[in-house]
Every structure is written in C-alpha cells, then in structure tokens.
Image: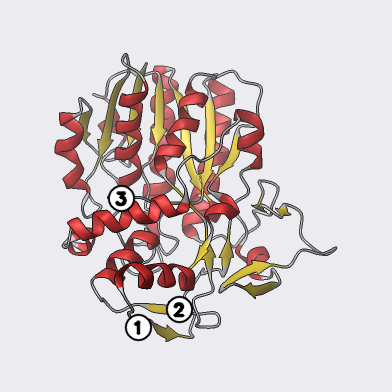
Amino acid sequence: MKILITGICGFTGSTLARAFKEFGVDVDVSGIDNFLRPGSEHNRAPLKAAGVGVFHGDTRCASDFDLLPKVDWVIDAAANPSVLAGVSGESSSRQAVEHNLSGTINLLEYCKRTDAGLVLLSTSRVYSITALANLPLTVENGAYRPRLDSATPAGLTTEGIAEEFSTAPPLSIYGATKLASEVIALEYGSAFSFAVWIDRCGVLAGAGQFGKADQGIFSFWINSYLRRRPLCYVGFDGAGHQVRDCLHPRDLATLIWQQMHAPDCAAERIQNVSGGVASAMSLAQLSAWCAAHFGEHKVGREPTARAYDLAWVVLDATRARRQWDWRPSISLEQILEEIAQHAQSHPDWLEISSAQ
C-alpha cells in the first residue's frame, strides 16, 4: 500500500507516518509539507531515517502535486488548525481559507487524477458555536459538564457531542472551512468514484506536539507549567473549568488503517474520533495534575473570553466504536505522562514551537 500524508512534518502527520510504517512491512509512506509551522523542520530527518519520503510543497499550490508519486491513499493532515485562524492577526482570513479549503480542493483534484482514496482529518469545530455556548453547564470536580434534560438538543448524549449535533453557523472561519471541505470531499468522492472517509477529531495530544495555547493546549500547558511560565485561565468563571477531551494520534492511526483496508465498507462516511468523556479534562484539573508532578505554580485569571472560545467540547465517538469496533488504547494519564517526559527532556520546546 502506498500512502501520501499532507502536513507530514506536523505532529499528527509525522505520528501517523511512523505508525503506518510499523503496521505493515509492505507500506510505502511519503508526504508533503510547507514547513510553515514552527518546529516542523525537526521532524524531517527522523522521518527520512524511518524510510518516509518527504517532499517540500504547499497544498495551496496545485502545481506542487504534479511531481508527487501515485498512491493508493491520501491522509489530509495539513491545515491551519487554530480556531482563531484568520481573525487573530497571525494569519489573514484569506490565508485561512486557502490553507484549509483551497488546499483540500487541490488535493481532491489529485485524488481524482490518480484514483486515490482520501481520509480527511476534520475537527470538533464543525459543530455550532451558538448551540454549544447555550448548553446549560454545571461544575463537578473542578470541571464543567452539561446538564441533560428534556430540552437537551439533538446530538448531545451522555458520551458527548455526536455527529447529529448542529453544524449551523457560526463555526469560526476555521470550522467553516473544515465543514466545507467535508462536503466538497464527499461530493468529489461520489462524482469521481473514489473512497472518502472523514474523521472529526477532538484534541490530538502527545509527546512532540508543538505547544501553543490555541493549537496544542495540553502540550503548551504542561511545558509552560514545568518551566514556570505565565499561565492564565481565560474567560468563563476564570477558574479553569473549561473542558476538552484528548486523543493520541497513534489511536487515530489504528482507525485510519482499518478505513484504508475497507474502502467499500457500508458505513457512515463521517465519524467522530476522540477519547471522549474518559479522556476529558478541565484546565483546572490539568493544573492539579501538573502541581502533583512538578510542584505548585500560580495560574492567573482573565475574565474576558476570547472569540470563538467554548466552555465544554467533548466528542461522542460511539459511531466509530459501532462501525469499526474502535476504541482508544492510550489513556489520558499515559498521554499526560508522555508529554511531561518529553517536556523534561526538551527544555527549549516552547521556543521551538513558537519560533518564527
């Protein structure tokens, strides 16, 4: 099997590439990366040493696909993954659309031309901000959780946000480009007869993730806490009760491996892929974990919420479990320990992650 991964030198892309090389002896893995993300250059040499081909290119440029090898499957792991993309000032709205939608269209044209299947990595941010912001929440053990009652919206379960939950705007520019990418990918797959799987991921986390507050929060928080860098609970009650679930990309790789081996499987093409409630944690709980491992460090409070921020986002991965008998094998505790060990052995990781 020949696999092409876009964004291959990012945290997710590089982890998937290494996993696929381990899963099968006859697997040829290559990828494309524009190396715009700080830290991504550090993954180039280790990938090449593992027998992974790395091409310098930008998915926004259609001609960069011309010299790529013909493959059986493409994993789209390239994106500007921040919910603040296009509005924070670090990138323009046009750049966000070009990265996350125009790049997908170029990739779909490549799949059409080469008859390759596609696994599109999407996001929890395709779900409606308004619907999520209006959920009634209570605080339990230092973390928000939704109150379920007769008025609970469709798609909200005891396990989290299911695929039936509203995707009505606003979503953020990032979320809108990913939802649009999902739709156009399914249309291309139907029109030109190639397989498409769409995996809506929760927060991906693990050792080697580039740590920034808006894209890699678990890595950012642990590295910052260990180094006694300033940290702050932003918005809501200012107590750090906001919650996210997390998933190690190696567990994502096991699902994608199944999907690539079952292109004609009679299953829903869109599924949530996450650690769910078992891996959900608030910032306050994460701080308590850090304090137990590294000692106390004061965290500040900023009551003004950021644009597009949400108090609680946990995905329900029941569909993936039902369709693929898939479950995460790497626990929340293992993910946190892995990040902490990496942080302790890489004291310059925050600088690497934010270098310009």
Residue beneath disc 1: 298
Compared to residue 253, the image places residue 237 above or below, namely below
Quadrant location of the N terminus in the rendered image:
top left
Q: Nearer the viewer, residue 176 or 102?
A: 176
Q: Disc 2 on helix, strand or loop? A: strand
Q: Nearer the viewer, residue 207 or 80?
A: 207
Give the mark nearer the N terminus: 2 vs 3. Answer: 3
Count of numbered circles on the image: 3
Image coordinates of residue 130 in percent, x first then y, are 64, 67
Quadrant location of the C terminus in the rendered image:
bottom left
Tell me: 71 left or right of 283.
Answer: left
Tell me: 83 left or right of 45.
Answer: right
* Residue drawn 57% across the image and 32% down it: 186
Callout in the foreground (2, 1): 1
Q: Which amino acid type is marked by label 3? A: Ala
Residue beneath disc 2: 234
* Residue drawn 31% across the image and 52% down it: 209
Q: Nearer the viewer, residue 60 or 210?
A: 210
Residue beneath disc 3: 207
Which residue is situated farthest in the top direction here? 26
Tell me: 311 left or right of 154.
Answer: left
Compared to residue 192, the image places residue 318 above or below, namely below
Q: Can residue 103 be seen at all in this image of the molecule?
A: yes
